[in-house]
Image: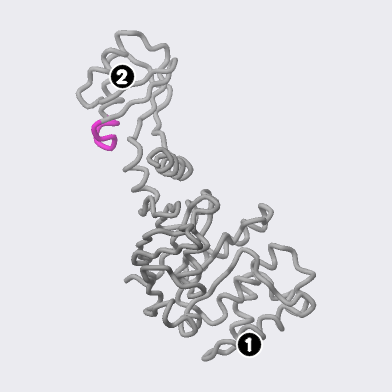
Amino acid sequence: MAIVEAHGLTKAFDGFTAVSGLSLEVAEGEVFGFLGPNGAGKTTTIRMLAGIIAPTSGHAVVAGLRPDLEPENLHQHIGLLTENPGFYNRLSARFNLGFFAGFYSGFDIDHQVEKYLRMMGLWERREDKVGTFSKGMKQRLALVRALLHQPKVLFLDEPTAGLDPEAAHEVRDMIQELSVEGQTVFLSTHNLVEAELLCHRIGVVRTELLALDTPENLRRSLFRRQVVVELENPNPTLVSTIAGLPFVQKIEQAGNQFRLELTDPEVYRPELVKDIVEAGGRIMSVSEERHSLEDIYLSLVREEENSG
């Protein structure tokens, strides 16, 4: 069941179109990655979905509500983590959270504060001034603040931007834990490793939506699977034999290494090995080339650039 829907969302500023005709759905309990370069419209999209700005045209439905028509009601059901969250640095973490929790209703504030501070590893620092926290700790505290009222959808805008590797790792661990608990997360990022690690599906955007699917399905649609075989001292006769196999569609040689496109790698990979051995070939290794999310992303963005 979709809990986030965008229908032709468009936002223009003084003649400049930041987001154009964006349509997508995010299922309940899904971690959805929203990828794109700087200036691609990711933050603008989140601001429209969160009811902070209204679209120029099109509309969205989030947690059953129209963000442009019912922003105050919507804010009771969503959590938002911006790239640079603000706190009262001279006040304690507990006081900050209690203050912000006062904007919501219908839950036990003390219980929720303790629950999420413990989850984020900050319970022992609850009485410390936020100004003494590292950037990574502030980001985890901001996650606590966004989760206190148990939102149906959590919007994260570049949650690990500017963090050192250790702090970024901690934040990603928290997102994974939330995913296990069934929290719906809309994650805007340009960190491709992060997206591949965390997200069930991804959308690639550059003003317009370029692609929307699981990383694995995008790999299959954009790249042909290649089996990589390394042989010991291949000879021309053996190479000719391999190239002539009915299920080998394409063969590329670089020294002792061969890249092969097969009609169906799952079915014919064992047959390929058998035929090479029977032809007298000595196999050093067999593997399959696997394209990363970075390959997918760059392919989509470059294709869009070339078409433009």
The dominant secondary structure in magenta is helix
What is the x, y in percent for residue 156?
54, 65
What is the number of the mark on residue 110?
1
Residue 185: percent from the left, percent from the top? Answer: 47, 67
Residue 1 vs 170, above or below: the answer is below
Most distant residue in the top direction:
236
Quick one: label 2 or label 1, which is nearer the N terminus? 1
Could you tell me which residue is drawn at 39 percent across and 78 percent down? 66
Q: Position of residue 299 (x, y in %)?
A: 42, 40
Which span is picked out in magenta?
A: 263-270
Badge 1 element? helix
**Which one is in front, 115 or 7?**
7
Q: Quadrant of the C terminus?
A: top left
Query: Quarter-wise, where is residue 219 in the image?
Result: top left
* Residue 266 among those drawn in magenta: yes
Instruction: Specify the amino acid type for callout 1.
Output: Asp
Q: Spot the residue most to the front.
A: 14
Task: Name the residue: 78% across, 76% down.
Answer: 128
Picture residue at 57% right of the left edge, 65% below the top: 174
- In the rendered view, tell whether residue 266 sits above or below residue 238: below
Is disc 2 surrounded by few (<14), some (14 to 19) or many (20+) residues within 10 Å? Answer: few
Question: Where 252 falls versus 162 (above or below)?
Answer: above
Q: CA distance from mark 2 to mark 1?
A: 68 Å
Q: Amino acid at mark 2?
A: Val
Residue 301 location (% of width, % of height): 44, 44
Q: Left or right: where does residue 30 sit relative to residue 79?
A: left
Considering the image in quadrants, where does the N terminus appear? bottom left
In this picture the colour scheme is: one colour
* Residue behind mark 2: 277
Task: Name the residue rendered at 26%, 21% in the picture.
Answer: 275
